[in-house]
Amino acid sequence: EKARELLLALSSYFRSTLESVDFMVTLEAELEQVKAYTKLEEARFESRLQVSFEAESRDLTCCVPNLILQPLVENAVYHGIKPMGGNGHIRIRIGPEEGGRMKIQVRDNGVGIDASALSKLQDYHKIWNIDIDVSGTGIGLIGTIQRIVLIYGEQASYQIRSVPEGGTEITFLLPVTWGGEEDHGDWI
């Protein structure tokens, strides 16, 4: 039964990744892909990894660029939780923020982020000058930030911070575009 469940999660993850040709998708679609991904990671780490989601159904109709949430969660797993032996919790929160923007937040209770890496990532205007290790590590978060900056410019913002009690918190504030709104042409 567990193998069947994981095979379904894997097929759902691959299907959403391979079929995702839309530039903008709803947060609901993004969250479904993340849920499939985290189901696989939870099985890998057994009961040592927990993932929780906090979002109102109304907020999930907001449209965002495709594939922006999964890299943040993957980053939390591999750079935050995995170095601790997989013992940890990842919390994903989605909700409106004052000023008409949508808040997307991924927080883990992992090892935290190195201070020098944090200072490089926090500078919005220097994000293009960061060396990206294309060997398989370090491209997800930076690539996601660069995409957000390219698409929204200064209409969006992000914050990366070390959590005092341990871990890392990444927050994006993005302009709200509700599902069904078709005019995304000026973002392309």
Image (spheres, rainbow, N blue to C red):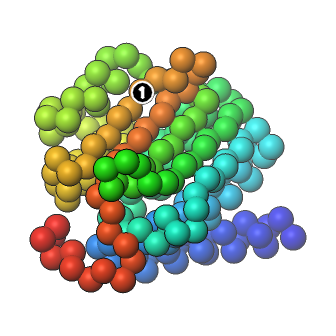
Q: Is residue 74 above or below residue 24?
A: above
Task: Please identify the quarter of the rendering in which residue 81 is found.
Answer: top right
Does residue 17 appear in the picture of this structure?
no
Does residue 95 appear in the picture of this structure?
yes
Q: Please, what is the three-letter code of the amino acid marked with disc 1?
A: Arg
x and y, in percent, of residue 18 in the image = 43, 76
x and y, in percent, of residue 101 in the image = 34, 54
Q: Residue at point 46% right, 72% down?
A: 61
Q: Is residue 143 above or below residue 11?
A: above
Front in this rendered view, residue 175 or 141: 175
Task: Please identify the quarter of the rendering in which residue 128 is found.
Answer: top left
x and y, in percent, of residue 68 in the image = 38, 57
x and y, in percent, of residue 45 in the image = 72, 44
Tell me the quadrant of the picture where the N terminus can be found.
bottom right
Front in this rendered view, residue 2 or 165: 165
In the displayed structure, does residue 59 sit left or right of residue 157? Answer: right
| Residue behind mark 1 | 161
Q: Is residue 139 above or below residue 161?
A: below
Q: Residue at point 58% right, 21% down?
A: 166
